[in-house]
Amino acid sequence: MKERSRPRRRPRIAPLRQDRRTPRGPAPRSTARRSPAPPGPVRGPRRPRFVTAATDHRLLIRGRLTALGVIMAVILLVLQLRLIDVQLVQGGRLQQMAQRQQLATLSLQPHRGRLLDRRGRLLAINVDAPSIYAVPSAIADRRAFASRLAPVLGQSPDEVLRRLQAGRHFAWLARKVSPRTAERAKALNLGGQLGIRMEDRRSYPNGALAAHLLGFVGIDSQGLAGVELAYDGTLRGLAGEALAEQDGVGRVLVETQRVTKAPQDGADLLLTIDQVIQHITERELDAAMARTHARAGAVIVLDPRSGEILALAARPAFDPNTGPAARPELWLNRTVAGVYEPGSTFKVFTAAAALDSGAVSAEDTFLCNGSLRVPGGHVIREAVARKNGLLTLAGIIKHSCNVGAAQVATRLGKPRFYDYIRAFGFGTATGVDLPGELPGLVRPPADWLGPGLQTIAFGQGISVTPLQLIAASTALANGGTIVRPHVVRGTRDREGRTTAVVGPGPVRRAIRPETASEVVRMMIGAVEGGTGRMAAIDGYEVAGKTGTAQKPARGGYDPSRYISSFLGIVPARAPALAVLVLLDEPLGAYFGGEVAAPVFREIAAQVLWYLRIPPATPARSRP
């Protein structure tokens, strides 16, 4: 029996998986017949596709790693070069920058030198004063800060805000305030937003005494007027330096400071003025101004032998403690910067020029009948139309005759008179060690038009400063030689040792000694029996001359405005004092012999007693 043939089973072909991943094992063999290969050249066996992809992937990774390595190498090279630049090339500069950020350089201000009178009494000193500052970087709400602080400082909130713009870590709000203001500011409890620093404040213990001579300083203790300005370099000293750490907001930690350069304090100045004589002078000047209601006034007390100024006063005055805040017109020192026509006090220099040149002798006489017609048709008249008849040169000085002085000047002539005027120092600054001195006004002879020669003879048509006039008088007191006026005797260090001495300076001869002696005798006559009788001092011989000058006005002179003055030397034979008194526009009586001569007498009498200068004759008892 034949066996049944079983049908051949076809092998199952698993369906292809849609997986794009590379197979992990070898691919299954296919049982399907392959088509014969097309005819062509015989090639080597083909690499599987999965081997090519793996190789490309490895090459890509290797390329990327190489590029990354190059980049890292370049970065490391750049960093290394930068490190070399920072450490070696710029190391010093960067170190300094770091120190500046961590350390603050403080300026250590020196103490300003003091001002002392000739006997060592204090006229200007330094006192501690609190100054208030802010740290703007620590202030979150500046407007609220300004609103709280402004009433305490006496400022507007806008002013406080403006001051806060001065710096990021430091801004001054108020300098050298009163202790009470500083305490009120502290009481606001503003913490690190506010600070207080102590500074030197200039103080003048005697108030307005000698204000124009002493001057005053600014907020940074810089001299602005008077001796404070003239000797600012000597008084200020040299600033020092210190290093101190600062915190993160820039506040200086003062307790960490170390001095790198010590400050050098300024030298003390020993002045020529005497505090007592200055007080006497100002008291009598104030009394005279109250009596006469004068617009302004000035007095100078000078030692004619040395040129030392013992007292210098000008009115109106100011308190140097508030000098910068005073009205600027009060700062004017009329003794060196006030120019005026001297009037009849100038006659003594006219007489000296006439005698010294030989143009006039002591015996020559001149007719003084109240008026004189001069070339050009002009008429010169006496102030009160007095008629004194024939007068010698001494009589002209004694009675203050304008007509006689005009005749003397006519004999002198313009060139010769001009030379003597300049020899006495008029038209040139005296060289006093005070700022702002003016040279006066002396026109050349070619400009002496009309009666110019004659009017200059009695002090009209020429302008001088009070200091020029009293400096010229030293020629009469010193046998013809002029000394330079000055206000500083020398300098002292903090231990009281004198480090420099200021002498009288160079002198120059203006006239012969015998001429000076003769003019002094004429001035004695003016006090003993002439226009200066009210300047006489019991027991002392006084040489003096009065002056009454009309003030210039448009087109001529104002008959209602005068400058009254008196120039005196005492004791006349052994001069120890020269005093000039000037009152500008007194009301009522205006003649120099009536309003200025008594002021001279009161000042000179007290100063002579203070200096223990004995009288030459016993004092007469006054009724």
Image (cartoon, rainbow, N blue to C red):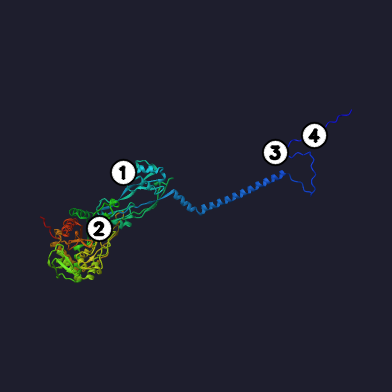
Question: Which residue is drawn at the image coordinates 13% and 64% (left, top)?
Answer: 386
Task: Find disc 1 in the rendering and name its residue.
Answer: 180
Examine the image and state in which quarter residue 577 appears: bottom left
On-image quarter of the N terminus: top right
Amino acid type of the residue tagged 4 in the rendering: Arg
**C-alpha span from label 4 to label 3:** 26 Å
The CA span between labels 4 and 2 is: 141 Å
Q: Name the residue beneath numbered marker 3.
A: 19
Circle nearer the N terminus (2, 3): 3
Residue 500 is drawn in which quadrant? Answer: bottom left
Whether residue 100 sits left or right of residue 76 in the image: it is left
Amino acid on which the number 2 mark rests in the picture: Arg
Residue 514 in sight here: no
Q: How far apart are marks 1 and 2 (CA)?
A: 37 Å
Name the spot of residue 249 as percent of width and height, x first. 43, 45
**Residue kind at label 3, given as amino acid type:** Asp
In-front residue for pair 199/372: 372
**Counting residues from the N terminus, which is met first, the one under dot 1 or under dot 2?**
1
> Which tag, 1 or 3, sits closer to the chain's start?
3
- The disc label shown at residue 260, or none: none
* Label 4 vs 2, first from the N-terminus: 4
| Mark seen at residue 10 | 4
Q: Which residue lies furthest to the bottom in this view?
A: 358
Q: Which of marks 4 and 1 is in front?
A: 4
Q: Residue 334 carries which label?
A: 2
From the top left corner, tell me how far across and down residue 439 is, in percent: 27, 63
